[in-house]
Amino acid sequence: MSLHCQGRFTTNITEASGGGYCKRTADDAPAVLSTGFDLTLDGDAINLVIRYSDTAGGLVSTDSIGAMTRLDRSYLDSDADLTGVYVSTQLGSVRWLSIDSDGVVQDTSADGFEKFRCRIDAFISPFDFSKVRVSYDGAIQGISGAWSDCDLTDQAGLRVLVGDASGQNDGAVRFYDVGPDRYVDAYLARDYPVYPDPVSRMNYARVCNQGLPTPIASQYNVDDNVCNDL
């Protein structure tokens, strides 16, 4: 079962509780569940209990999860250069995005690469982890802004992963490297039921940096001429 969740919590450093919404596949379509959770931190370990309910309040199931919070070494330091042009690795028609040195995120395009889905006007800013006593290896930052024309529910593999990401979103971005290539995952959350689809995950790869193609750019038919135009 594909399950994607978002929520808010309050914490006293070693414990947290809160709630939110999850999205899963039911009858080949997205279905929304309410969630409540209790979390405890023990060193670098997270212990999490999650309760799932239908939107009418009926309990559906309960999960208990134990996991390490330390991230893989492929993730970036917080002072890494995140600027450049990124393309969607999920669907060819999703517009490219650019990130500048001030953390401004906007959709962009190049001649010969017409894209019509997912216009973006957003901003990336650091989270304050000073009150959370766990270890982080990498760049996890907040993102907020507006997405439009970003309904991917017609794509079978993306109905739950992305769904309809249109609207005002707040969430997180996670940057990481695989070899010389840089990637970003965006986890987006929208107010429910104002927006019927409460959560999305989008994935991008960087193809241009400082006007030059990155090592992975050729896989997306991006070369010096394209990066110069951007």
Image: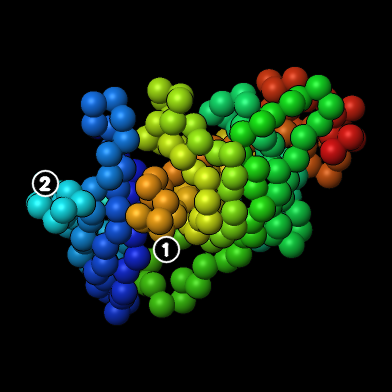
**Place of residue 137 in the rendered image (x, y in percent of width and height, measured from the top left):** 49, 56
In this picture, residue 100 sits left or right of residue 177 = right
Crowd tier of the residue under label 2, counting other residues whose Cα lies within 10 Å: few below 14, some 14–19, many 20 or above: few
- In the image, is residue 75 above or below residue 114? below
Instruction: Kindly indicate the quadrant of the structure image that contains residue 205.
Output: top right
Report the disc number at residue 60: 2
Q: Which residue is mark 1?
A: 135
In this picture, residue 117 sits left or right of residue 40 = right
Q: Please report whichever mark, 1 or 2, sits nearer to the chain's N-terminal start.
A: 2
Q: Please identify the quadrant where the N terminus is shown.
A: top left
Residue 174 in view (yes/no): no
Give the amino acid at mark 1: Ser
Q: Are marks 1 and 2 in contact (CB under 8 Å)?
A: no
Report the disc number at residue 149: none
Give the amino acid at mark 2: Val
How many angstroms separate mark 1 from mark 2 (CA)? 33 Å
Camera-near label (1 vs 2) is 2
Crowd tier of the residue under label 1, counting other residues whose Cα lies within 10 Å: few below 14, some 14–19, many 20 or above: some
**Place of residue 85 in the rendered image (x, y in percent of width and height, measured from the top left):** 73, 40
- Residue at position x 46%, y 76% in the image: 130
Residue closer to the observer: 175 or 148: 148
